[in-house]
Image (cartoon, grey):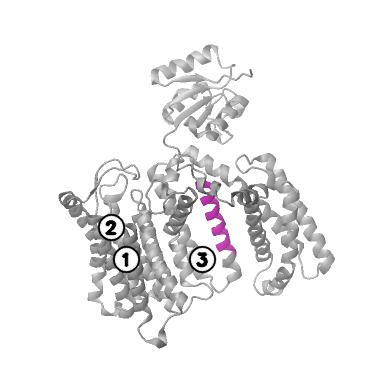
């Protein structure tokens, strides 16, 4: 039945998408190009009709199997709220409702949904904070999906991934009918993606995004009224499953506030847009957010599967949170408001305090390292001890944790690590990490030996801890350079450059190309006549042979231009290079370095 629901919904949405696409222009449902949008041609909208009808068509299979019809008090209110938000979206698509009107409507519908799920009996009334949080959650997720619909294929694909994870992980809690609805909606979104994939030929409109958000938000609320899943509440699982729309909405609202802009004012400042500004193609930006949605759902699956072992799942949750924060900080550095991204923050009365806190004392780095030290020290115990033995030695972890935490963060500070820039973090800076971790390891061992005479401790724990912490601290520091490198190599707007000469000048040139996005140059390959460098990677760029392989490399790697990196490249070698480039109609330039 689940497979049938998925297939029926996919086919129905695919066919209805064609109908909506042809009918929409006749009723004026067309979105023209605008500066705050990401498309450049008039595009039909209201594709949410195909999504909603396709979802209902897929769910109609329950008529053939009454056993699939769960308790009405669970799925009927959720479906009703989703259809109500669908109507609100239709009105907005046709009449252009104000952001305030849509917010009020979503809050009102969310309140009635909470009332319906809780029941009317006073004895079963929810605590006040449940009602408030549930109502705000419903409205927040609806508008998060609405905001996420900012790039072709993004909202539909992410919502399909989230719906499948929610049906799979929370199926027992939401009931068979609601799980079937989620699967059917995933199928409908897949059918709609045929029309919405880049370049989109049909937009879902607010009727689609609000319907999707309402069904996901309402489904996430249902398990709240059931028994909690061990220590992991269904709300946490739902937040991980919906990490992309929640992260994107929070990111945009915070950055707009810091830029002194209205939160309700649209713009090309979302996570997807900033990825595109880094040089990723539209398809690549969407795929990155698909992967983030899968990572969030996968983390939720691990939390649920190992819910009886919170000391295993909590470090994973913390690690996922650290990665998300680093990703957000990196993207926040991408200009989106004409160099006024943090103008409101700079003008605030507490700006000097924040500047000292964030930049002089590097409080953010210290807080990050506290998390990393905790995760690595606990992981070292998990690696060293297994089964019942772990339970025996965990009290020693708890007892020694404050000492280890204080000594290691102090050692990292004394190593000079917090005075080093993440943007230029390289091999020389690794020495500071090794000094800090090594000194912290030595102090921790001495402290444990002094206080506990090493009774109940293992040298293996500290060895594992040192290795893990070195890797974790180094990885976080180098993460910004790695993300810049990935963005530079995937930049579709950059010219693909072949550097002739992989010596010191060539390596310097390749590094500068990747460090300066304004150059719009991507070093794809080296050619070098030194046979010792053949088939090697130098500075992250492969050496693709010598002069004999030059023309083949030009054609194989679709080179746009060639740069000669050394004055030693001249004579017959230079003539041969220029002959090939003239025949292939590719420019040749030469690096000149001088000090004046």
- Give, as a single range, the part of the protein colored magenta: 315-332
Toward which corner of the image does residue 140 lie, by quadrant?
bottom left
Sequence-first disc among 2 and 1: 2
Q: Look at the numbered disc 1 and give the secondary structure of its residue.
A: helix
Residue appearing at x 18%, y 49% in the figure: 25
Where does the image place residue 413, in percent across and percent down from the top left?
Answer: 73, 51
Q: Nearer the viewer, mark 3 or mark 1?
A: 1
> Does 396 lie within the magenta span?
no
How far apart are the alpha carbons under marks 3 and 1? 36 Å
In the rendered image, the residue lying farthest to the front is 349
Above or below residue 138? Residue 471 is: above
Task: Provide the residue designation for mark 2.
Answer: 97
On the question of residue 117 being in view, the answer is: yes
Pointer 1 local density, CA inside 10 Å: few below 14, some 14–19, many at least 20? some
Q: Is 120 positioned to the left or the right of 231 in the image? A: left
Task: Provide the residue designation for mark 3.
Answer: 302
On the question of residue 7 being in view, the answer is: no
Q: Look at the numbered disc 2 and give the secondary structure of its residue.
A: loop
Above or below residue 210? Residue 575 is: above
Q: Is 346 positioned to the left or the right of 436 in the image? A: left
Sequence-first disc among 3 and 1: 1
Q: Which mark is residue 105?
A: 1
Where does the image place residue 261, in percent across and percent down from the top left?
Answer: 43, 49
Instruction: Depth check: give the residue in front, 204 or 2.
Output: 204
């Amino acid at each position: 039945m689940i497979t049938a629901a998925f297939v029926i919904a996919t086919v129905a949405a695919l066919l209805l998408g064609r109908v909506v696409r042809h009918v929409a222009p006749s009723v004026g449902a067309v979105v023209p190009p605008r500066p705050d949008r990401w498309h450049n041609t008039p595009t039909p909208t209201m594709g949410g009709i195909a999504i909603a009808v396709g979802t209902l068509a897929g769910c109609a299979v329950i008529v053939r199997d009454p056993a699939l019809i769960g308790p009405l008090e669970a799925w009927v209110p959720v479906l009703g709220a989703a259809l109500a938000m669908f109507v609100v979206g239709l009105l907005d698509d046709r009449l252009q409702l104000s952001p305030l009107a849509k917010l009020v409507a979503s809050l009102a519908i969310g309140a009635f949904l909470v009332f319906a799920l809780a029941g009317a009996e006073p004895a079963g009334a929810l605590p006040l904070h449940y009602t408030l949080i549930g109502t705000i959650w419903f409205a927040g997720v609806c508008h998060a999906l609405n905001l996420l619909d900012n790039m072709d294929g993004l909202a539909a694909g992410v919502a399909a991934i989230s719906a499948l994870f929610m049906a799979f992980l929370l199926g027992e809690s939401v009931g068979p009918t609601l799980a079937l609805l989620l699967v059917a909606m995933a199928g409908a979104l897949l059918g709609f993606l045929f029309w919405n994939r880049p370049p989109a030929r049909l937009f879902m409109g607010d009727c689609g995004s609000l319907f999707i958000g309402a069904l996901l938000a309402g489904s996430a609320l249902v398990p709240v009224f059931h028994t909690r899943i061990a220590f992991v509440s269904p709300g946490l699982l739902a937040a991980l499953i919906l990490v992309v729309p929640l992260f994107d909405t929070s990111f945009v609202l915070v950055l707009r506030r810091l830029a002194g802009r209205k939160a309700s004012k649209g713009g090309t400042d979302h996570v997807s847009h900033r990825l595109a500004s880094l040089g990723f193609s539209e398809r690549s930006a969407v795929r990155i957010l698909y992967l983030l949605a899968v990572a969030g759902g996968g983390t939720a699956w691990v939390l649920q599967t190992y819910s009886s072992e919170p000391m295993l799942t909590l470090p994973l949750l913390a690690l996922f949170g650290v990665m998300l924060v680093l990703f957000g900080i990196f993207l926040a550095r991408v200009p989106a408001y004409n160099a006024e991204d943090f103008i409101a923050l700079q003008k605030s009365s507490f700006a000097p305090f924040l500047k000292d806190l964030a930049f002089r004392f590097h409080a953010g780095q210290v807080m990050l390292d506290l998390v990393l030290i905790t995760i690595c020290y606990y992981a070292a115990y998990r690696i060293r001890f297994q089964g019942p033995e772990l339970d025996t030695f965990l009290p020693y972890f708890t007892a020694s944790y404050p000492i280890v935490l204080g000594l290691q963060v102090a050692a990292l500070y004394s190593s000079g690590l917090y005075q080093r820039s993440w943007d230029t973090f390289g091999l020389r800076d690794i020495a500071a990490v090794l000094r800090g971790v090594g000194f912290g390891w030595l102090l921790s061992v001495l402290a444990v030996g002094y206080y506990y005479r090493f009774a109940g401790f293992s040298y293996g724990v500290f060895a594992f801890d040192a290795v893990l912490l070195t890797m974790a601290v180094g990885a976080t520091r180098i993460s910004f350079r790695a993300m810049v490198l990935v963005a530079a190599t995937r930049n579709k707007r950059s010219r693909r450059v072949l550097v002739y000469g992989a010596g010191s000048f060539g390596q310097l040139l390749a590094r500068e190309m990747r460090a300066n996005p304004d150059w719009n140059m991507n070093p794809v390959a080296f050619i070098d006549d030194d046979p010792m460098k053949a088939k090697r990677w130098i500075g992250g760029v492969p050496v693709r042979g010598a002069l004999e392989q030059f023309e083949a490399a030009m054609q194989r790697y679709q080179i746009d231009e060639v740069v000669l990196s050394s004055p030693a490249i001249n004579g017959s070698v230079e003539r041969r290079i220029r002959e090939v480039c003239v025949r292939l109609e590719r420019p040749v330039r030469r690096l000149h370095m001088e000090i004046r």
